[in-house]
Image: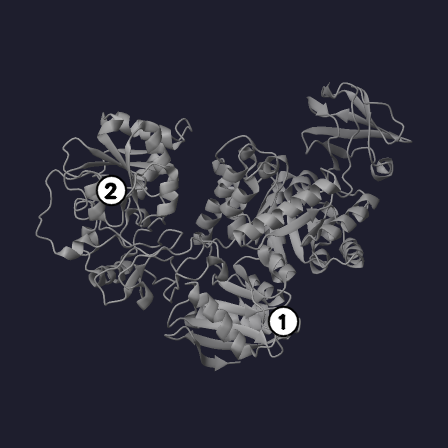
Amino acid sequence: MRGSRWPLGRDHRESPFRAGLSRLKLIRHGAGACGPRSLWWRWAPDQSLASRSTPPRPASRRGVFIGSAFSTVVGVSDDGARRYKRELISEALSRLGLAAADATMIGDRRYDMEGAAQHGMRAVGVLWGFGDADELRAAGGAGPGRFARRPGRRARLSGAGASRQSTLSGRARAESPRSPPSRSRPPSSRVLRSALQAESLRRPAARGQPLPPAQRCPARSRAVGRGQGSPGDVFFRRERVGPAAHGPVKLRTPALAGQTHMLPRNVPLATGGHYNPAMNSKDLPSVPAHRRRTRILATLGPATDAPGVLDALINAGVNAVRLNFSHGDPESQRVRAEAVRAAADRAGVEIGILADLPGPKIRIEKFAEGKIQLQAGARFDLVADPDAPLGTVHEVGVSYLGLPDDVEAGDVLLLDDGLMQLQVTAVEGARIVTTVLNDGVLSNRKGLNKQGGGLSLGALTDHDRQLIKVAADIGVDFIAVSFCRNAADMEEARSIARSHGSDAALVSKIERTEAIDNLAEIIDASDVVMVARGDLGVEIGDAELPGLQKKIIRESLARNKVVITATQMLQSMVESPMPTRAEVLDVANSVIDGTDAVMLSAETAAGAYPVRAVEAMARICVGAERQFAQDTDFEKAQRNLERADQAIAMAAMFLSEHIGVAAIVAMTESGGTARYLSRFRGGVSIYAFSRHDGARRRMSLMRDVFPFNYDSRGQTPREAARGSIRLLVEAGLLGEGKRVVFTSGEHMETHGATNTLRLLQVGADGRAEGLGEL
């Protein structure tokens, strides 16, 4: 089931929905009559219908909005015991008391047909869902001609009228009534489904309340058939755009008259426009169908090296990937980077690549037995000597030879992310004498931190400097500097990267106490800031971490920098197919705090469910974004203006908030204008057009920004405005009558030269008509 929850108490939304129903002539009794007792009976008046739905059963009953009339709803069980299509179908047949030969599967996707074939059931493919005839036919579940393009055809194919025959649906259907409705309804009631389809509606929690209008249609937009409108009218489903966006969208497209066409799956319709079925989907701008605004950064590793996993991650919603240079050799990272570029080309999306340098991570050395058991109160020594023997229960070597100079009696050292705690009692040359504070197991090469910070180790090691060259050769888009202490660390890393010909954006990882003390200068010296909560939490303590996360995000936005929140966001999904409620709230709160991106580490690099982790992250982000509301403080923003393009970005966002626009279209060479626009968190889509591959990939981590390829060389700003907006209209992302803010420079090929703002309106023919210029 897909769709949006309907908030109660929003009755003002029902009027436009009823008006839409009136125009469609689907029913005569308003929104409340579009439930199962008036719509679904007409499809199969003599059949008993049940639902087989992928979401858990409680969510399925709520999602199909027909709980009281729907006696058989089968969904994924909450305990995970029932997860696959074949299991759901078996459960449905069992509850109905039917043999497979007495039931028919009605489905719109490949796995519906395959599930039917596994049970020996008849199958009918419907072409008004998410699948097409080729997909259904390839599944082998539907025989020749067993495809329904409208409900009446579906009823005949499934054998309506058989008293014991039941129909299992691949989406949501309602149980037939105790008494069939009158047959005297007008022919218009046979119109193929519109926005009334069950998967795009949500029922109020309390029974007996009027059925609400659709707040948001399903993710993938597509034609739903020809209604009773004027010749050539075609009804399309579309995503919610703006507070008054309800119901179907009617597009006057003569080429589609009398036909039903499926739009490319990656093209969501907004409020109108023209669609040419002969156009290849690769020629259209590609925007994620769910319109998630927060970006997802996923770490690659052994779990993602399996064939097909990388493509699945991108399809699930990954916007950028992380190469962890702490693990693996340079050649393996190069192979992964090439695989990412190839997968991104196949998907037609921009995927950024981030190289994460290992930094000066202090670790203990190896033990003779691999691990030891420590007892509270025991003495345990750390030896800062490269010739130290293998560790025992009494001592172990450390990688940082300067550690004895940075500690003194009374300091607390934290090992293995704080699981083991040692208190320094004395420093004897290269030997640090400590007392164990808690029982526990300690194994090879675990990390070591000093509580409260204060270690003098620099941010860049010689190995890091070599890896920056490797990252430059690979052509990564971001380089992350671990354990940075100040602006000088970031400037050194930038200088090395530029000397090797890399224009990668520099990411500062805030994970040391010293970095908090120098936060402002580090942010100013960075392009992107990462809240690396692992080591940071160990050094400053758990209690201080939530407040610091909010502070880092707030300061980064104020200083016009992109910010990533990272570490253990869905850690349980390394082994579990579902996140914990605490993890859901953690991710959601990061989104509400205003982060640009959230990062998955071991969840995707080494976890058992990498794709599910991304899918869960995407769902949580979308849900949190509905709750996100930020009123831009333009007076405060004015105090930080230093450049013309910053002023243009603020003016564009001011217009979008005060006069209402459908989108902001930005022509950008380096991505700077898109970054400034994104900092305001206005909630309006920012379509950023650039001819530079690197610039578009660097925009992959910017919240609200959708980067597109567009070469404006040789064009005037007005020509670029017409060309870019025409592309958006053809993709269905903009429609007739919509206002658009367009930003550009007078010279289209100059970096940092954005100085012009235009307020445009999309005309009937998709042309941009000027309303004003600044």
Q: The N terminus lies in which quarter of the figure?
A: top left
Which of the pair 661/92 is nearer the observer? 92
Q: Is residue 767 left or right of residue 73?
A: right
- Residue at horizontal 66%, vertical 49%? 354
- Identify the disc placed on residue 66: 2
Q: Is residue 119 left or right of residue 614?
A: left
- Picture coordinates of residue 90 (x, y %)? 32, 27
Name the residue furthest front. Answer: 144
- Residue at horizontal 60%, vertical 79%? 746
Q: What amino acid is labelled 1 in the image?
A: Leu
Q: Secondary structure at mark 2?
A: loop
- Picture coordinates of residue 585 (x, y %)? 49, 42
Question: Residue 703, can we see it?
Answer: yes
Which of the pair 23/122 is nearer the observer? 122
Q: Relative to 547, say whether 387 is above or below.
A: above
Label 1 sits on residue: 641
| Neighbourhood count class around disc 2 (C-alpha, 10 Å): few under 14, some 14–19, many 20 upward | many
Q: Relative to 361, say whether 592 is above or below.
A: below
- Picture coordinates of residue 56 (x, y %)? 37, 35
Q: Is residue 649 left or right of residue 66?
A: right
Where on the picture, by quarter, is residue 105? top left
Q: Is residue 495 left or right of residue 668?
A: right
Name the residue furthest right. Answer: 429
Count up the numbered dots.
2
- Picture coordinates of residue 96 (x, y %)? 23, 28
Q: What amino acid is labelled 2 in the image?
A: Ile
The disc, 2 or 1, on the residue closer to the chain's N-terminal end is 2
- Identify the disc placed on residue 532: none
| Neighbourhood count class around disc 1 (C-alpha, 10 Å): few under 14, some 14–19, many 20 upward | few
Mark 2–mark 1 Cα distance, whole angstroms, equals: 53 Å
